[in-house]
Image: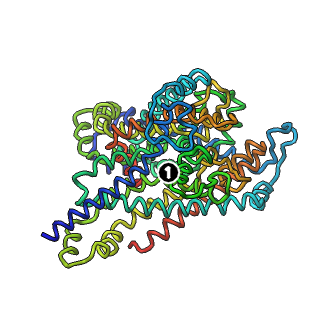
Amino acid sequence: MGKRASARSAATVMFVLLTLLTAVFLFPIYWAVTMSFKEKADILVTVPYYFPVRFTLANFSDILRKSSYNIFAYNSAKIAVITTVLCVIIAGMAGFALTRFSFKGRKTISNGIFIIRMVPGLVYTVPLYMIYNRLGLLNSHFGLIMAYCTFSLPMSIWLFLSFYEEVPHEIYESAVIDGCNEYKLFLSIALPLVVPSISVVAILCFIGSWNEFGLALTLMFKDVYKTLPIAINTMIQHERDTPFGSLAAAGTLAMLPAIILSLTTQKYIVKGFTAGAVKG
Amino acid sequence: MPMLEARKGVKIQKSLSDRMAPAVFLAPACILLALVSLVPIFYSLYISFLKYNLAKPISTVRFYGLQNYIKMLTNPQFQDSIVWTLTFALSSLVLEVLLGMILAVMLNSERTKRFNAPFKTFLIIPMMIAPVVSATIWKLMFYPVYGVINCTLQLMGLGQINWLGDTFWAKIALIIVDVWGATPFCVLVFQAALKTVSVEMLEAAKVDGASPWRTYFSITLPTIRNFVALVVTIRLSDALRVFDSVMQLTNGAPGVSTETLGTTIYKTAFRYNDVGQGSAGAFIFFVIVSVVAMVAMRLMRRQET
């Protein structure tokens, strides 16, 4: 009897502790989202309104009107979607080849991909800036998408490797005996088997490119080409008085995919991060 | 050739198009990575041996030997940024691993099984948010007069803190932002790790009357040792690369006290247009990150045989 009571009180302690820690972790998000709907007068106060008392969309209409955030959001979405599609297709093929066939140089290629994955993004900023400058690819979304492949593609291939490895080889062999060629094998057998994994790769690619900052900062400096992170950075650098409401609104806009994906596709995110980590 | 035939004797003779398949499937990835990754890396290596300033006419570009590397390494500000970046990475790492482990153990415990699902979901969110955005949000919270943190401290009767204006507190602020964003990753991997611990062993320890602490340190921790090594290595190399949140939160201020390796190199190349020295710095940076990661991996995994 006493033991059960102590077990229950331990559960209560853990519940309280988890609630407190989670609240601390969620507070900044809560604060930014509620601030983005607050009136200016309710933001610039020394006794904060922890719970909003009035509701306004003024901050959002401000950032759309004054600094065309719809364009930045569109740029971000476009670049993230194209990078994701490109990486899923190319990495899906490469991962299949590296697990299905044994050929000379296979080890070299997978090691090379692993090493490229370790290179910090900063290493690419100077040479890409100079090469793009010569090729006229600065302020070009095509150029930025190509630059994003430097980190998205190795990560995607790496993830696909671990997913394809789970496919039993007998499935391939029996298809080959049935007269299936390698291309048909890939399209109608291998790919359908790793469909859930495609979502994992797609989510990580999308969020990686949606959130990217360093390369976009170097390669996109004309306003109409900027992505959301760069626009937010510009906003904090240039205005003398920090525009609290606008920054909160811009931040809320930029966090939206992260929040939606976390709440709806948690299973895939967990799989992606653990597979990526354990494999690496 | 005959030998190959003999070995593959059982297999069906493959058509030419099937024999080309590996090349066909790998070509896009290899060509793309060669163009956007290898070419820039080698080009940057070449630039790092040149005296090359983008603001000066192209005719001033000349071979500079190892001068860029020497200048970068002997620059006191660069040395300071190495010290600060290492301090930052180590302090963030310790906090993230500790906090991540505590949360993971609680989420994995039998006792929280009934209610832990929403916590697991919510705790993912910070990890998915762009560092620039989280730094922005925290910056609004750290604000001296209207920031919610200082206002709350005031309400609690504590003194206000000059978060971003004071060197010490600016550094603490950067560490807080990193811990906030990266702890969820540690929680995630540790949760997966804790699932690999044998339930029978834990039960046996319980029957033998071992305390939860004793069980954790004698059974759980040794079992998940390699996962911990992995998290430490990944987090350490990520924290050493810190760039986005510094640019957004402090931009190196006060003075240059919070400039990290990343921001120092970036500014050398793009604010002072010295792309030669910037490239040299980037390679020094790459070496530091790789060496620290490898040392961490070796140290942590040593006892595994």
Residue A184, x across and y down, in percent? 31, 30
Q: Which residue lies furthest to the left in this view?
A: A1
Q: Which of B255 and A38 is in front in this view?
A: A38
Is B209 displayed left or right of A257 in the figure?
left
Residue B70 x/y as whole percent: 78, 59
- Inspect this view and state whether residue A260 appears: yes
Residue at image position (38%, 46%) is A272
Residue at 79% across, 48% down = B50
Q: Position of residue B19 (x, y in %)?
A: 39, 37
Horizontal relation, residue B196 to residue A37: left or right: left
Q: How is the image coloured?
A: rainbow
Q: Which chain carries label 1?
A: A
Q: Mark 1 points at which residue?
A: A114
- Eyeballing the image, is B135 above or below B90? above
Left/right placement of residue B157 relative to residue B110 reads: right
Residue in view at x 21 percent, y 68 percent:
A6
Q: Which of A84 and B138 lies nearest the eye of the viewer?
A: B138
Q: Where in the figure is residue A14, as x and y percent of width and height?
A: 30, 60
Indicate left or right for B225 with B180 as reference: left
Quadrant in which the C terminus of chain B appears: bottom left
| Viewer-nearest residue: B85 or B49 | B85
- Identified by mark 1, the residue type is Phe
Residue A246 vertical position relative to residue B239 in the rendered view, above or below: above
Secondary element under disc 1, as helix, strand or loop, is helix
